[in-house]
């Protein structure tokens, strides 16, 4: 009798948590964006930071460059005909999200997007708790305008929408977008 090698498939399929993934929030978002595009759910891209090339190596490879200006928010896209513009931030703090993580020009971008009827928000990864939340732009602006230095964890959990991981999609933040803006 010949014993051919067979591949055993484990029936105990586990969802890896964020710590086990070992990847940054932006990488998780980028992979999720690929899934959304491939499955015709949404079209969202990472906005490149504008740079000025100072030196190349002769083969058009950049060897020295500087950032031109402060960029706006990290991601831009369209979901169900609606404009999305959002930022991704991580914090190791166990007490809240420091508003100093958002620059003034980013707060201004959030405000302008909302003014022009787009949806703007911040995805916040609370590393200490391995939790990710969508915080609506209006909530962020209200906190910043009240001169808070930090949004407490309890406020994030109360006013934010937790972003869950899934089997087929790494980080399903569009589900949180649906809850925040379409299921009111």
Image: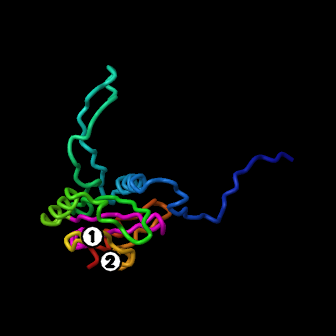
Judged from the image, the secondary structure of the residue bearing numbered disc 2 is helix
Distance (Cα) linking label 1 and label 2? 8 Å
Residue drawn at x 24%, y 42% as measured from the top left: 50
Asked whether 106 falls inside the magenta stretch, the response is: no
Measured as percent of width and height from the top left, residue 14 is found at 59, 64
**Does residue 184 lie above or below 126 as drawn?**
below
Looking at the image, which residue is at 36% across and 55% down? 33
Magenta residues, start to end: 119-143
Residue in view at x 23 percent, y 35 percent: 52
In the rendered view of the protein, which quadrant contains the C terminus? bottom left
Q: Secondary structure at mark 1?
A: strand
Residue 13 relative to residue 62: left or right = right
Q: Is residue 1 left or right of residue 46?
A: right
Mark with earlier residue (1, 2):
1
Q: Please state which of residues 43 and 139 is positioned toward the viewer in this rendering.
A: 139
The mark found on residue 159 in the picture is 2
Residue to which mark 1 is pinned: 136
Residue farthest to the top?
58
Q: Residue at x 25, y 64 (%)?
A: 80
**Side of 43 relative to 15 (left or right):** left
x, y (%) of residue 79?
A: 27, 61
Residue 21 percent across, percent down from the top left: 52, 56
Asked whether disc 1 touches disc 2, contact meaning CB atoms under 8 Å apart, the reply is: yes
């Amino acid at each position: 009798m010949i014993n051919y090698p067979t591949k055993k498939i484990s029936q105990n399929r586990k969802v890896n948590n964020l710590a086990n993934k070992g990847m940054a929030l932006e990488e998780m978002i980028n992979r999720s964006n690929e899934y959304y595009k491939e499955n015709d759910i949404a079209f969202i891209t990472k906005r490149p930071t504008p740079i000025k090339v100072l030196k190349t190596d002769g083969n058009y490879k950049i060897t020295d460059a500087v950032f031109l200006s402060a960029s706006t928010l990290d991601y831009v896209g369209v979901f169900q005909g609606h404009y999305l513009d959002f930022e991704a931030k991580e914090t190791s703090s166990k007490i809240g999200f420091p508003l100093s993580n958002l620059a003034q020009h980013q707060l201004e971008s959030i405000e302008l997007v909302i003014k022009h009827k787009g949806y703007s928000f911040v995805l916040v990864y609370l590393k200490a708790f391995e939790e990710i939340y969508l915080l609506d732009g209006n909530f962020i602006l209200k906190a910043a305008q009240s001169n808070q230095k930090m949004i407490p964890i309890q406020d994030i959990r109360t006013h934010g929408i937790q972003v869950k991981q899934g089997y087929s999609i790494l980080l399903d933040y569009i589900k949180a977008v649906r809850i925040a803006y379409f299921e009111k």
